[in-house]
Image (spheres, grey):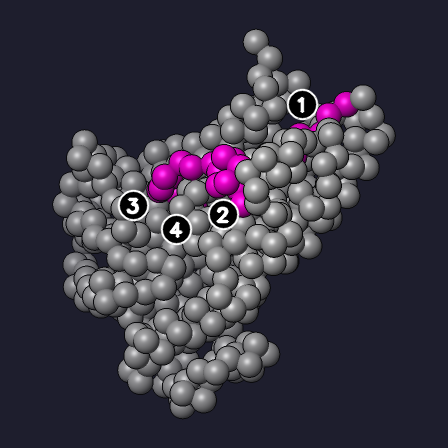
Amino acid sequence: MTLSPAQLLRDAFNHAVEAASPGVCMAMHLDELLTGDALVLGAGKAAALMAAEFAQRAPGRVRGLVVTRYDHGLRPEESAGNIEVIEAQHPLPDGAGVEAGQRLLDLARSIHPNETLYFLVSGGGSALCAAPLPGVSLTLKSDTTDFLMRSGADIREINCVRRHLSAIKGGRLAVAAHPAKVVTLAISDVPGNSLGDIASGPTVPDPTTQGDAIRILERFACPQLEDLRSVLTDPANESPKPADAAFDNDNARAIATSKTAMDAAARFLSTQGCEVIRLGDDLTGDARSLGREHARLAIQHATEGKKAALLSGGETTVVLRENAGRGGRNLEYLASLAQELHGFKKVYALAADTDGIDGSSDAAGACFGPDLLTQAEANSVDLAQCLEKNDTHHFFEACGLLVKTGPTRTNVNDFRLLLVGGK
C-alpha cells in the first residue's frame, strides 16, 4: 500500500527518533566498554533511559545518579537498578538542578579505586546540572542563559558561557573524579557533535577561555556582563584544558548524532521509492532564513519535474520579539517555509525536534501540505501575523497540524523533511 505524503512524513520522523533512542544506540557500544564495577553519573533528556540500559548490561556492581528533565524519568515498568533517577527543570535551571549538580560532584569525588566512572550525557544536561561557581547566583546564571537564547545565540556560544560560570561543566566533573578512569557516552544534540558542547561537557576538557565567554557576552550586549566580569576574569575560575593530565586515561564518544537519525530516515524513505537528497545533518543559522532557502530549493526541484525527499538536521536559532507568543525553531522554520511557498502545490513538509518539544511549544513540531493557506483561512488565522509575533504554535494548532509525541527521551536535535512531487 502506498503511503500518503502525511503518513510518509510522520513515519520517516518516527524512524529517525527510534534510531537515536538509548535502547538502540547504547547496545552497539556498551558491551565493548563495560568492565568491572561502575559509578554511573549522567545528565540530559535521555539520561533515565540511558541509565536503565546501562543497568541491564553492566557485568559488575553499579551505583550512581542521573538527572533528567521533568516528565522524562522512568516509567513504572522500567528500572535503572541502583542508579537513582531525579528530575529538574529545563531549559532554564531551577533549585533541583543546582542540587543535582552538587550531588554529581560529590559522587564523583567519592569514587572507589576499583570503579570506573561512566558519564551518560545527552542534550538538556546544561540546565539540569547547574552548579554555578561561587559568586554566580542561580538567578544571574538563569537570566544570562535566557538572554542569550532570546537573542539568537547558537548553542556553542551559549555553552561556552555556561562552562565558564559552572563548577561542574567544562571538564570539572572528570577532574573531581581524578585519578579514576572516566568513560563518557553521549547522545549529541549539537551540530558538529563536539563533545564539549553536549551538556557543556562536564567530563570533557574545554578548549575555550574566559576571554571567549566575555567576547560572546559583549557581542550580544548582555546586560548581565558587568555582574559576571569579576568571575570571568579570575584565573582561578578558568576551566581545565585539553593538556590537563586529569583526562589522560579518559574515553569519550558520541553514540548517536543527527546523522544517526537522518540515516535511518533516509533508509526508510528509500524503501518507499523516494530519491533522498541530503541537505546536511548539521545545518545552523536563522530558522526563518533556512525555511525560505529550502522553499526555493523545493520549488526548483518541483518545476524541474523531480520527485524527491529533501532531508536535513541540525539546530537553527530564533530571535524572540518582546512579548513573544509560543513556538520554537521548527515551527518558525515551517512558517517561513510556507510563506515562501505561498500555496505551491507540490510540496509537503515536516519539521520537528527529536526530543518531542519544540521551544516553548508542547509539540515536537508540525507538518503541512499544499492546502495550508486554505486551512488557515478556514480557521481564521494569519500566517504572517503569527510569525511576526513568534506565535507559530497558535497558527499550526488552529490548523490542526501540530505533531505531538510527548517526551521521546532522546535528543539529536531537529528533523526536517520536504516531499517534493513530480510532474
In contact (CB < 8 Å): disc 2 and disc 4 = no
Q: Amino acid at mark 4?
A: Ser
* Helix, strand or loop at mark 2: helix
Inspect this view and state whether residue 374 appears.
Answer: yes
Q: Which mark is residue 288?
A: none
Q: Amino acid at mark 1?
A: Cys
State the residue in front, 26 or 346: 346
Q: Amino acid at mark 2?
A: His
* Helix, strand or loop at mark 3: loop
Among numbered discs 2 and 4, the one appearing first in the sequence: 4
Q: Does residue 301 appear left or right of residue 211 in this picture?
A: right
Pointer 3 residue: 72
Pointer 1 residue: 274
Q: Quadrant of residue 415?
A: top right
In contact (CB < 8 Å): disc 1 and disc 4 = no
Among numbered discs 3 and 4, the one appearing first in the sequence: 3
Q: Quadrant of the C terminus?
A: top right
Q: Which residues lie in the magenta part?
A: 393-422
Q: Amino acid at mark 3?
A: His
Among numbered discs 1 and 2, the one appearing first in the sequence: 1
* Inter-mark Cα distance, 3 to 1: 34 Å
Question: Can you give x and y, in whole percent of width and height, for residue 33 in the image?
Answer: 34, 43
Question: Can you give x and y, in whole percent of width and height, for residue 360 in the image?
Answer: 43, 54
Pointer 2 residue: 394
- Please name the residue shown 71% across and 49% down the image: 292
- Please name the residue shown 30% across and 58% down the image: 89
Q: Of tags 2 and 3, which is closer to the observer?
A: 2
* Helix, strand or loop at mark 1: loop
Pointer 4 residue: 122
